[in-house]
Every structure is written in C-alpha cells, then in structure tokens.
Image: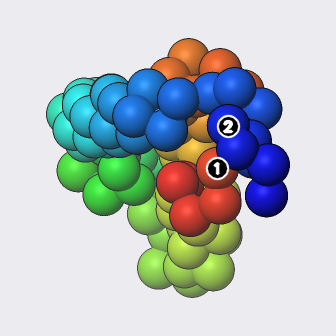
Amino acid sequence: MAKGFNPMGGMNMNNIMKQAQKMQKQVQEVQEALGEKTLEVTSGGGAVRVVVSGAKEIKEINISKDVVDPDDVEMLEDMIVAAINEAFRKADEVTESEMRKVTGGVNIPGLL
C-alpha cells in the first residue's frame, strides 16, 4: 500500500467509532423509551381492547361482556388474536419510525 493510503476514503477511524458509540447509546435510549410507551388497539368494533408496550409486551386485554357468548367462543378468540396482531404491527411501526430517527434511515442488520 502506498504511504498515507486510507481505505476509509479519508474518514478518521476514531470519528467513525465515536459516531457508532453515539448511535448505539441513542438506540438504547429509544428502546428503553419504547418499552415505556403504550399502544392501544381494538377489534370487533371496540368489543376487544388490547394495550401493549412498544416492546410488544401485552399490558392489558379488556373484553366487553356483550361479546362473551359461550356458544361462539371462536368469534371471541378471533377478535382477541386480531387485536393482538394489530397491536404488534403498530408497535413495529412505532419502533421502525423511532429507529429511523436515530439511524437516519440506514438499515443496520440486527438493530431491530
């Protein structure tokens, strides 16, 4: 290699490491904040309400007494599954949006 050759295109490795550490700290802060954030979703016209954290932990499930039909448990199960899946999708969207703010839209494998 020629003397003074820098394979990083003139970028200082120390600056890159500092930026990476700063981004890692910001990502950790966002993840902690997301864990505290709650998202609420309903299904069945509000008959089933699910509250999850941004970290996709189920915090609450509320079921209206009007939809508890012993002869049609399957419908209730479907509404619960639909609400939970929608809550998790919503949590994923919030997580991706918040992480994009930290990473500037750069896809970093294993980050999410």
Amino acid type assigned to the residue bearing label 2 in the image: Gly
The crowding category of the residue bearing disc 1, from other C-alpha atoms within 10 Å (few below 14, some 14 to 19, many at least 20), is: few
For image coordinates 49% across by 38% down, the residue present is: 13
Q: Mark 1 and mark 2: span between their CA atoms?
A: 30 Å
* Image location (x, y in percent) of residue 108: 64, 50
Relative to 74, residue 45 above or below: above
Q: Position of residue 90 (x, y in %)?
A: 59, 38
Circle 2 — which element? loop
Quarter of the picture containing the C terminus is bottom right
**Could you tell me which residue is drawn at 44 percent across and 63 percent down?**
68
Q: Quadrant of residue 42?
A: top right
Q: Is residue 23 left or right of residue 29?
A: right
Q: Which residue is mark 1?
A: 108
In the rendered image, which residue does mark 2 sit on? 4
- Mark 1 or 2: the one toward you: 2
Q: Nearer the viewer, residue 104 or 71?
A: 104
Residue at image location 65% in from the left, 20% down from the top: 104
SS label for mark 1: loop
Q: Residue 50 or 15: which is nearer the viewer?
A: 15
